[in-house]
Image (cartoon, helix red, strand yellow):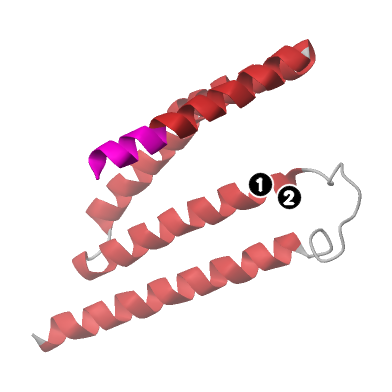
């Protein structure tokens, strides 16, 4: 099974490399933008995101009661993922023709609803964990 998965992964990697080379060779401008995108992500992660997440984890581990640590850490991770996924749609107006049903949504409102649901679940999980801890 490992061999099958390894071969499939290598095939997907080769196909991605082929598509990247085709994209980069088609236009120098696009190649520069792709290169900056590939380099910018890791640099932004290592310079900004990782230190902020590390500091937040330290605060969670030292300031919150034990039964709130896991729900808050999970909620923070879910918040980060949701915001990261929403950034392209919130950053600038879409540069493509309208596609009914796809681009006609209120993305800021959708993000806020999703974040409210995540943090409502965090509060519920923290309260349940606190109740269980007091009962035992």
Residues packed near mark 2 inside 10 Å, few (<14), some (14 to 19) or many (20 plus): some
The image position of residue 129, as x and y in percent, is 24, 78
Relative vertical location of residue 92 with respect to residue 103 in this rendering, above or below: above
The image position of residue 79, as x and y in percent, is 50, 57
Is label 2 in a helix, a strand or a loop? helix
Which residue is at a point 90% across and 54% down the rendered structure image?
98
User: Which residue of the protein is positioned furthest toward the left in this rendering?
Assistant: 136
Is label 1 in a helix, a strand or a loop? helix
Residue 51 in view = no
Relative vertical location of residue 37 with respect to residue 93 in this rendering, above or below: above
Query: Circle 2 is placed at which residue position?
Result: 90
The image position of residue 131, as x and y in percent, is 22, 85
**In the rendered structure, which segment of residues is drawn in magenta?**
1-9
Label number found at residue 87: 1
CB under 8 Å between discs 2 and 1: yes
Residue 19 in view = yes
Judge from the rendering whether residue 43 lies leftward or rightward of residue 62; answer left or right.
right
Prevalent SS, magenta region: helix
Task: Answer with the quarter of the image where residue 103 lies.
Answer: bottom right
Task: Answer with the quarter of the image where residue 4 lies.
Answer: top left
Per the image, is 97 magenta? no
């Amino acid at each position: 099974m490992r061999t099958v998965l390894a071969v499939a992964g290598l095939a997907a990697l080769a196909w991605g490399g082929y598509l990247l080379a085709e994209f980069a060779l088609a236009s120098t401008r696009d190649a520069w933008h792709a290169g900056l995108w590939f380099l910018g992500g890791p640099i932004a992660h290592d310079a900004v995101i990782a230190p902020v997440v590390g500091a937040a984890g330290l605060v969670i581990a030292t300031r919150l009661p034990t039964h709130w640590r896991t729900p808050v850490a999970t909620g923070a991770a879910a918040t980060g993922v949701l915001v990261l996924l929403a950034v392209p749609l919130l950053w600038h107006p879409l540069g493509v023709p309208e596609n009914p049903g796809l681009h006609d949504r209120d993305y800021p409102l959708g993000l806020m609803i999703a974040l409210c649901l995540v943090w409502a679940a965090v509060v519920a999980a923290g309260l349940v964990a606190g109740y269980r801890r007091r009962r035992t």
